[in-house]
Image (cartoon, rainbow, N blue to C red):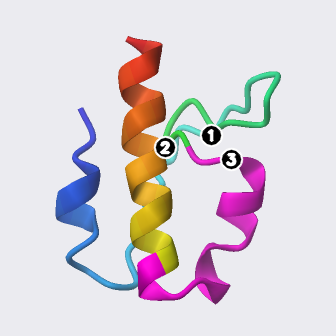
């Protein structure tokens, strides 16, 4: 399983797990980011990235 919090320690690390498949809500079933979060990742501040990682964790837990 992906541990998003450990990835957040590397400030440029993307949570991408190279298992890209978008659902009907444009959420990636690999990393649980929304399409807008994926495409905007490199322009985000560290604070924004941490907020996205938090959302990803919540989405992942909801999917279980």
Circle 3 Cα neighbour tier, 10 Å, few/some/many (<14 / 14–19 / ≥20): some
The magenta region covers 33-47
- Cβ–Cβ below 8 Å for labels 2 and 3? no
Give the SS element for disc 2: loop
Q: What residue would you read off at disc 2?
A: 31
Q: What residue would you read off at disc 3?
A: 34
Given this view, does label 3 or label 1 mark the residue nearer the observer?
3
**Magenta highlight: main SS:** helix
Q: Position of residue 62 (x, y in %)?
A: 44, 19
Measure the alpha-carbon separation of dots 2 and 3.
9 Å
Residue 34: in sight, yes or no?
A: yes
Q: Residue at x 59, y 83 (%)?
A: 44
Measure the alpha-carbon separation of dots 3 and 1.
11 Å
Q: Position of residue 29 (x, y in %)?
A: 57, 30
Q: Position of residue 12 (x, y in %)?
A: 40, 84
Res 20 label: 1
Of the 4 image quadrants, the one containing the C terminus is: top left
Q: Residue at x 68, y 36 (%)?
A: 27
- Cβ–Cβ below 8 Å for labels 1 and 2? yes
């Amino acid at each position: 399983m992906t541990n998003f919090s450990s990835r957040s320690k590397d400030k440029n690390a993307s949570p991408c797990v190279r298992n890209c498949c978008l659902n009907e809500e444009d959420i990636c079933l690999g990393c649980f980011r929304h399409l807008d979060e994926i495409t905007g990742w490199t322009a985000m501040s560290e604070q924004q990235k941490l907020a996205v990682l938090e959302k990803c964790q919540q989405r992942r837990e909801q999917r279980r």
